[in-house]
């Protein structure tokens, strides 16, 4: 991946920041994008020791125009694009019947439409390089998680979009990777929205027992390098996907009971 040009959305924190470090450490030229300019500057400081080219671009990917400008800025700066990593995402934690519909719209606009917009404008350039489109999905994109209707819906939609994109371009050399981390130690839970669309602030889970963002980034880097089609991370994640395939009714009960154990769970 040395000297390849890689766009990473949601690069101001979590898995996105870890991906920027991982690719930069391997010699890739990176474009880091996100809404928080201060967070992007902090990410860029972490990349300084690797002596690679870095382009910082502030964008809200829920807005189509921002996505178009992100791709244009990348092409203007580097004259090529090899990898697009659709990583930016937001989550939620609330019962659907109590949730303001605007919460679901915000989640879909970022998690699904943001990836669609970026991919749409990047695709001609990725096809030219026979490059890669990566979607950072979730186990929630394989199994609907109670209390996360909007999040699961957005990840199911993302996976359907990417699977179709892969098939459409089967003979054009485009690589499409769907990466499904399990629970990862990031800030996504502390920034996830409640039923009113406000940040819940405190994570309901023990972050210390989760896979680190750096570990997830290393797995995704390897999967891009080897042009894998899917990766599912963590033992629990793989077990969930396998059991749901053969014992879906059992998994409904297991997932319900597991999520109900969270502190202040919206359901019991």
Image (spheres, rainbow, N blue to C red):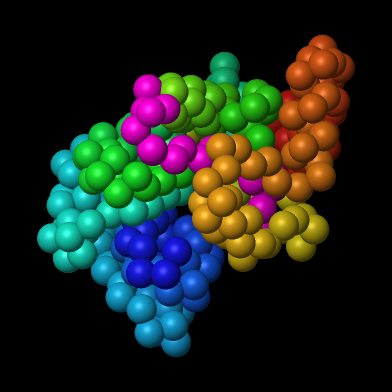
Queried whether the magenta region covers residue 176, the answer comes back as yes
> Residue extending furthest top?
249
What stretch of residues is rendered in magenta? 168-185
In x, y percent, where is residue 252? 79, 19
Which residue is at the front of the view, 222 or 116?
A: 222
Report if residue 110 is visible in the image: no
In x, y percent, where is residue 97? 57, 17
- Which residue sits at x=41%, y=46%? 132
**In what quadrant of the picture does the C terminus appear?**
top right
Which residue is at the front of the view, 189 or 219?
A: 219
- Which residue sits at x=66%, y=35%? 139
228 vs 2: above or below? above
Report if residue 3 is visible in the image: yes
- Which residue sits at x=70%, y=46%? 233
Quarter of the image for residue 42 reads: bottom left
In x, y percent, where is residue 205? 74, 50
Residue 136 horizontal side relative to residue 110, left or right: right
**In what quadrant of the picture does the N terminus appear?**
bottom left
- Which residue sits at x=46%, y=38%? 176
In x, y percent, where is residue 218? 61, 62
Residue 234 horizontal side relative to residue 189, left or right: right
Quarter of the image for residue 230 reads: top right
18 vs 47: above or below? above
87 vs 94: above or below? below
Disc tally is: 0
Queried whether the magenta region covers residue 7, the answer comes back as no
Residue 257 horizontal side relative to residue 72, left or right: right
> Residue extending furthest front?
171
97 vs 169: above or below? above
């Amino acid at each position: 991946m040395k000297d390849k040009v890689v766009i990473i959305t949601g690069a101001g924190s979590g898995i996105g920041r870890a991906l920027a470090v991982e690719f930069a450490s391997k010699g890739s030229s990176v474009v880091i994008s996100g809404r928080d300019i201060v967070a992007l500057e902090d990410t860029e400081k972490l990349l300084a020791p690797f002596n690679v080219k870095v382009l910082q671009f502030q964008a809200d990917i829920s807005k189509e125009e921002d996505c178009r400008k992100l791709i244009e800025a990348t092409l203007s700066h580097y004259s090529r694009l090899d990898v697009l990593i659709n990583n930016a995402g937001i989550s939620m934690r609330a019962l659907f019947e109590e949730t303001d519909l605007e919460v679901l719209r915000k989640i879909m606009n970022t998690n699904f439409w943001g990836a669609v917009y970026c991919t749409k404008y990047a695709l001609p350039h990725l096809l030219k390089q026979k490059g890669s489109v990566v979607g950072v999905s979730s186990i929630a994109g394989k199994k609907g998680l109670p209390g996360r209707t909007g999040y699961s819906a957005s990840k199911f939609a993302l996976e359907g979009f990417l699977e179709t994109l892969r098939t459409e371009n089967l003979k054009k050399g485009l690589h499409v990777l769907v990466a499904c981390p399990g629970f990862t130690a990031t800030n996504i839970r502390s920034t996830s929205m409640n039923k009113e669309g406000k940040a819940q602030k405190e994570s309901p889970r023990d972050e210390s027992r989760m896979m680190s963002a750096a570990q997830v980034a290393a797995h995704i880097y390897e999967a891009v390098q080897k042009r894998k089609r899917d990766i599912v991370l963590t033992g629990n994640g793989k077990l969930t996907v396998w059991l749901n395939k053969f014992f879906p009714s059992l998994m409904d009960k297991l997932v319900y009971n597991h999520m109900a154990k969270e502190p202040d769970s919206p359901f019991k």
